[in-house]
Amino acid sequence: MGRGTGRGGRRRRGGIPAVTSKKTSPATIAAQALGWTDPVTRAVVPPIHPSSTFVRDPDNRYSSGRIYARADCPGYDQPEAVLTALEGGAAAALFASGSAAASALFLALDPGDHVVIPPVMYWSLRNWLLTFGTRWGLAVQVVDPTDLDAMAAAVVRGRTRLVWVESPANPLWTISDIGALADIAHAAGARLAVDSTVATPVLTRPLTLGADLVMHSATKYLNGHSDVVAGALVTGTEDGFWQRIKTNRAQMGGILGPFEAWLLLRGLRTLFARVPLACRSAQLLAERLAAHPNVLEVLYPGLPGFPGHETARRQMAGGFGAMLSIRVRGGAAAAIATAARVGLWTRATSLGGVESFIEHRSSIEGPGSPVPPDLLRLSVGLEAVEDLIADLSDALDG
């Protein structure tokens, strides 16, 4: 498996791209959405194409390159091209959700294939793999990715086909060494896929570190406004495995609607404005909460004493993410009571929106979760950080 190869602003189908230099900043790529304009109207904002089908030529060909929207939605062209450029990949594919993207990837494997997953990861996907995935025929093994010796022992040539990691890993924010894990996977002839939802391409580009595939729950930071459910995959190589993933999307129907794709593109254009601001607020919040008498522990990669801090410094550029968790003194009851007392924080699941969320995570995940019962997960939004600190401090004080 090779490293990802950049594609820059190369045009696929649809809009007219601006001429971009190889040195164009990712922030510029995102803000201008590669500078595409509508070829008919010259509009800088793309139209929404709701059509489900496309006209066949008199000679029975499809000169437009499109047959049916389930596989050929015009609204995917620009956001997929932007994601490809931001991740330094070869191609991207949008899906109806992060779960749809991940399941399409795993179902591109064959029954009997061995996959290695971490104990801390998106809980819904973990449950899917350990229930449906195993019933379908995957051999799923849970291994701590921070233990490189254990990973090297688990990943076996001729057996292991995929290593899946999430970094930072929700909701304990465990940091995995992507480059080291890529070396382990590739030495055994396996692929490395990284859930980079929390890091986003603003902070980490896993393909440039050696990963083969990147997944995003685009509902979160890529969209950034809590109004779209979407997912995305980016590949470093357009190989046969990638074609199987694309076929899964078309045949299983886990597709994104054209309006949702349009909203996602709009969100992507402000990604580099939103994420750094939220990261700065999260860093300050973590530092302040670490000194609060009713906080047992702050879990945040930006704190020097956090396990994996040095790895995070090496592979995360410009911040440590806008997600953190706190463990509240007094156990689950105290944590739930703290969440009940907040005024500015929104008690809701999900993350990555402009508003700040707080959630008692073990209540969501239930039995078997690795999440301590006293843990509150915090998604830091774009509000004034001093307001957020004061509100949560008051709630912790009771």
Image: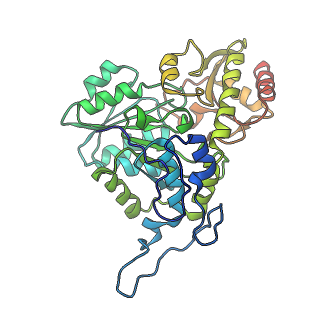
**Closer to the camera, 18 or 345?**
18
**Closer to the camera, 47 or 355?**
47
User: What is the x, y in percent for residue 133?
Assistant: 34, 45
User: What is the x, y in percent for residue 103?
Assistant: 40, 49
Q: Quadrant of residue 397?
A: top right
User: What is the x, y in percent for residue 242?
Assistant: 34, 51
Name, please, the residue furthest toward the bottom.
Answer: 58
Please name the residue shown 31% across and 24% down the image.
151
In the rendered view, does 299 fall on the left or right side of 386?
left
From this viewpoint, is residue 375 visible? no
Please name the residue shown 69% across and 28% down the image.
336
Question: Which quadrant of the figure contains the N terminus?
Answer: top left
- Reply above or below: 9 against 347: below
In the rendered view, does 281 fall on the left or right side of 60?
right
Please name the residue shown 59% across and 32% down the image.
361
Question: Which quadrant of the figure contains the C terminus?
Answer: top right
In the rendered view, does 149 fall on the left or right side of 384?
left
From this viewpoint, is residue 253 visible? yes
Name, please, the residue furthest toward the left.
Answer: 158
Q: Quadrant of residue 303?
A: top right
- Reply above or below: 288 against 17: above
In the rendered view, does 130 fall on the left or right side of 175?
left
**Closer to the camera, 267 or 293?**
267
**Closer to the camera, 98 or 186?**
186
Please name the residue shown 48% across and 55% down the image.
95
- Reply above or below: 201 against 171: below
